[in-house]
Amino acid sequence: MSDAMASKKELQMEELVSLCVRRGFIFQSSEIYGGINGFWDYGPLGVELKNNLKSAWWNRVVRQRDDVEGLDSSIVAHPRTWEASGHVAHFTDPMVDCKKCKRRFRADQLPSGSCPASSKGDSDRNCDFTIPRNFNLMLQTQIGASEDAAAAAYLRPETCQSIFTDFRRVKEVARQKIPFGIAQIGKAFRNEINPRNFNFRSREFEQAELEFFVRIEEREEWFAYWLEERLKFHRSLGFKESNLRTRPHAEDELAHYAKAAADVEFLFPFGWQEIEGVHDRGTWDLDRHTEFSGKDLSITDEATKERFVPSVIETSVGIDRTTLALLANGYEDELLANGESRVVMHIAPHLAPYTAAVLPLSKKVAEPAERVVEKLRRNWNVFFDVSGNIGRRYRRQDEIGTPYCLTYDFDSQEDEKITIRDRDTMEQERVPIDSISMVLNDRLSTDLT
């Protein structure tokens, strides 16, 4: 690379948020009304990145395996589901209100019992707090046309419970035997007291969860297997090793139903935080739903005729958190040896919002360049840009993470070649237009190995 990197600046969260809003990755929901805390919208680039992440997860966990089935369950489940799961009784955070500033906080997150600074930057260390009380995090809704006769229900706080209630049906229709898993991607909702760190902790979020059903005596083996599998997946997303780690839960951290748990953590600008959890849930969920529904969710071993309740190994990844991690991992404000600088987003090519951008050197060659775009769009999301200096167009694509820029110039009509530029190295190569699809395929295949 001709103007190799001379130095590197440390990422500040404000810079990343600014880019996300300015370039249309992520911005606040209902922005024209002042926004609504804890809810975020994904713009043209963000929705592509998020969908590519979900597709990578689905391919890895479901389509590439014979022992996992897919599911898409409803957001609203029978209210008894949440009684059985323990959410109605126990899904709470300690909350306090300040009588003085009229703000609400999680009691376990107050520094030395004082009010944190508000968005205006002020802080009053003499706040008058109420006594801590439990606050249920589930969002309640009503089902029924008549307000008087409407039944109370909840927006699901997690996606896994419907997997447990659908366990018997899915096992039968898919003709699966233990061990096997059920996976789904979907929205969940939690009425967080204090949403924070951009879209990291929100009230509406998306999860990709796998519940893998095993014999109880094999649970330790499968827990270790899935923890390693999930770590491999995150490495395949392009996360730097220095930004990724696993953290086993101490005994006093474990949920009441868990036999073991570990988090896959990413180093955000605001510190190490969980992006995925792997849990040994034992038989607790199927036992509880058997008790509350009256339906037997145990199964029979066809060979031994033994009847037993499967144990569950769960993997649960936060799609929004991982999307934010991809942006934080990829962002670089690069100072080049020639004194210039560029912001570049090093997103793995198979995840990037655009696989390639076709850039005619001049509007005079726009028409034949558009024919290249039309052909490539059969397989990939391709951006077309004819406006402005070619160097500035390169920089725009660097900033949004487009891995390959294809420049169609005046010689292209004569030699039937196009210049492909690599985002990360900025190296350029002249290749035949007829083989550009094969070149992109080869590069993307290398990216996925």
Image: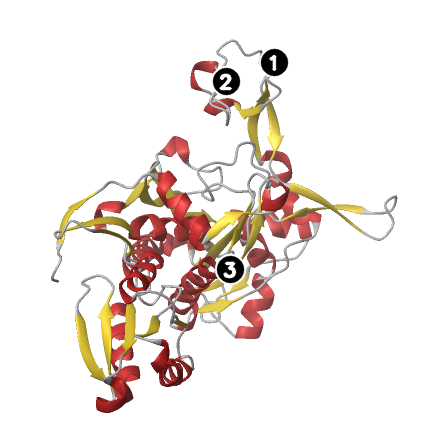
Which residue: 17% across, 68% down? 427
Q: Which one is nearer the viewer's eye here, 131 or 300?
A: 131
Q: Residue furthest front?
A: 364
Q: Quadrant of the C terminus?
A: bottom left
Marks 1 and 3, how far apart at CA:
42 Å
Q: What amino acid type is highlighted by mark number 1?
A: Lys
Q: What amino acid type is highlighted by mark number 3?
A: Ile
Q: Which label sits in the foreground, 1 or 3?
A: 1
Residue 78: x and y in percent read: 70, 52
Q: Are marks 1 and 2 in contact (CB under 8 Å)?
A: yes
Q: Residues within 10 Å of mark 1 (few under 14, many from 20)?
A: few
Marks 1 and 2, how far apart at CA:
10 Å
Which residue: 54% across, 63% down? 299
Q: What amino acid type is highlighted by mark number 2?
A: Cys
| Residue ID for mark 2 | 115
SS under mark 3: strand
Q: Residue furthest top?
A: 126
Task: Name the N-terminal-most of marks 2 and 3.
Answer: 2
| Residue ID for mark 1 | 100
Q: Which one is nearer the viewer's eye here, 10 or 166?
A: 10
Which residue: 85% across, 53% down? 145
Marks 2 and 3, how far apart at CA:
37 Å
- Compared across the picture, whether 13 is left or right of 127 comes to left
Decide: is 357 above or below 229: below
